[in-house]
Image (spheres, rainbow, N blue to C red):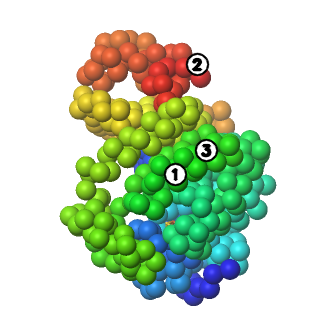
């Protein structure tokens, strides 16, 4: 158990929707976390970065929003969850909802209990095996995605980089147990740290063990180090534990980009290698279409799919300018339509609990039957044809083969 200091505060927000789903988590409802700060204390955590305004000593000081579950219950009583269907995210970039403080406060469990009556799907991302305690509540959601982050299966490297999190073996156990419970599950293999966990030996062992545990996707990503507290902390650990790497990191992150991105020339081929390795295992390198189509409306599914296609094609060195333009066009259409519908008084009934979602999806389904309407929507004939075909055949886009498959 890690030591920590708690500061109790009141949550100002509860359940809220975005105009477009988050392509990373594939959630429409903004992510909820009862905690701010994280005792997992990962060496690479960008929650330390100044842009997140987390006060106190990272890894030790935790803000606890004691009223989150009550706020969510109030929101559900007011019907905030009605009219639009979509997945709710739990977790954030600046906390783990199952870090040690959860064993003391139990607020994530209370939050899940409060969310059940909304009848919406839920996504969880955690590095802590405590999530397994809550499988009984998760079983009451219509659809569940349990994700865990694993960056190495080497316990020593994990201790160095993620000292407060559950061990890699326990995290592989989350994948297996989630699968056994019938939840969708996969691994965020990020950040893969240069010269430590991004080596071919590490990624091979990591990908193989995740696949054996039952992961339905493995999403790799490289390390970003934002100038300021995050970068300084990482370099401090490196200087103490791996001084021979300091110079190589100084070169790689010497541009000091605000995004924390390293020089791209050495990273791009690595990312391609990870994606190629996963493709040979027939393993999706992003949350696959077959999973997020269970969590999102048809309209939102198409948006996330377009974003994912951009990334998948780019990794294979295929130009994506036309795809980017089509995605932007579609995103504008979807958010405009949604904004207009949200302004209207639309009646909800037991037989029609999500009328905004139904209206948007009906319109897109209708367009899919008319080639000229789909073409006008995307301004891209091939893409319009593919999306129409996916909709009309209720099929999925398979990421390893980049082709349409039965749903
Ligand atoms: S688990 Fe996530 S939020 Fe917590 S310290 Fe690690 S990277 Fe940061």
Is the CB of the residue bearing disc 3 within 8 angstroms of ligand 1? no
User: What label does residue 362 carry, if any?
Assistant: none
User: Gap in Å between the C-alphas at discs 3 and 2?
Assistant: 26 Å
Is the CB of the residue bearing disc 1 within 8 angstroms of ligand 1? no
Residue at 60% across, 58% down: 153
Q: Which residue is mark 1?
A: 201
N-term mark: 3 or 2:
3
- Image quadrant assignment for residue 194: bottom left
Q: Which residue is mark 3?
A: 208
Horizontal side, residue 374 vs residue 305: left or right: left
User: Gap in Å between the C-alphas at discs 1 and 3?
Assistant: 11 Å
Horizontal side, residue 361 vs residue 323: left or right: right
Picture quarter with the C terminus: top right
Q: Which residue is mark 2?
A: 406
* SS for dot 1: helix
In the depicted view, which residue is nearer to us: 32 or 345? 32
N-term mark: 1 or 3:
1
Residue at 46% across, 62% down: 196
Residue at 32% across, 36% down: 314
The answer to whether residue 405 is visible is yes
* SS for dot 3: helix
Horizontal side, residue 279 vs residue 319: left or right: right
Task: Indicate which label's residue lies in the foreground, 1 or 2.
Answer: 1
In the depicted view, which residue is nearer to us: 198 or 173? 198
């Amino acid at each position: 158990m890690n030591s920590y200091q708690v500061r109790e505060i009141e949550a100002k927000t509860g359940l809220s929707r975005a105009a477009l789903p988050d392509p990373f988590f594939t959630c429409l409802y903004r992510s909820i976390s009862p905690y701010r700060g994280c005792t997992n204390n990962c060496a690479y955590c960008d929650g330390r970065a100044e842009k997140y305004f987390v006060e106190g000593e990272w890894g030790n000081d935790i803000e606890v929003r004691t009223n989150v579950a009550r706020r969510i219950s109030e929101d559900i009583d007011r019907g905030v969850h009605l009219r639009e269907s979509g997945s709710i995210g739990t977790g954030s970039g600046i906390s783990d909802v199952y870090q040690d403080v959860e064993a003391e406060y139990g607020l994530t469990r209370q939050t899940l209990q409060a969310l059940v009556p909304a009848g919406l799907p839920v996504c969880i991302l955690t590095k802590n095996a405590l999530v397994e305690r809550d499988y009984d509540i998760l079983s009451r959601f219509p659809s569940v995605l349990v994700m865990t982050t694993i960056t190495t299966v080497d316990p020593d490297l994990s201790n160095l980089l993620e000292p407060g999190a559950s061990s890699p073996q326990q995290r592989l156990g989350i994948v297996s147990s989630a699968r056994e419970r019938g939840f969708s599950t996969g691994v965020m293999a990020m950040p893969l740290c240069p010269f430590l966990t991004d080596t071919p030996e590490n990624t091979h062992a990591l990908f193989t063990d995740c696949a054996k545990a039952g992961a339905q996707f493995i999403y790799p990503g490289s390390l970003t180090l934002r100038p300021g507290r995050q970068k300084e902390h990482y370099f401090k650990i490196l200087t103490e534990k791996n001084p021979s790497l300091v110079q190589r990191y100084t070169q790689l992150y010497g541009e000091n980009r605000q995004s924390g991105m390293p020089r791209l020339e050495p990273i791009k081929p690595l990312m391609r290698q990870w994606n190629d390795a996963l493709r040979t295992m027939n393993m999706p390198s992003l949350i696959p279409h077959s999973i997020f189509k269970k969590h999102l409306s048809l309209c939102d599914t198409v948006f996330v799919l377009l974003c994912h296609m951009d990334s998948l094609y780019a990794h294979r060195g295929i130009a994506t300018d036309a795809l980017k333009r089509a995605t932007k066009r579609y995103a504008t259409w979807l958010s405009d339509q949604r904004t207009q519908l949200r302004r209207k008084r639309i009646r909800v009934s037991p037989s029609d609990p999500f009328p905004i979602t139904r209206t948007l999806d009906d319109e897109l389904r209708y367009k899919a039957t008319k080639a000229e309407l789909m073409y006008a929507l995307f301004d891209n004939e091939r893409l319009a044809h593919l999306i129409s075909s996916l909709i009309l055949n209720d099929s999925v886009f398979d990421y390893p083969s980049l082709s349409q498959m039965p749903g």
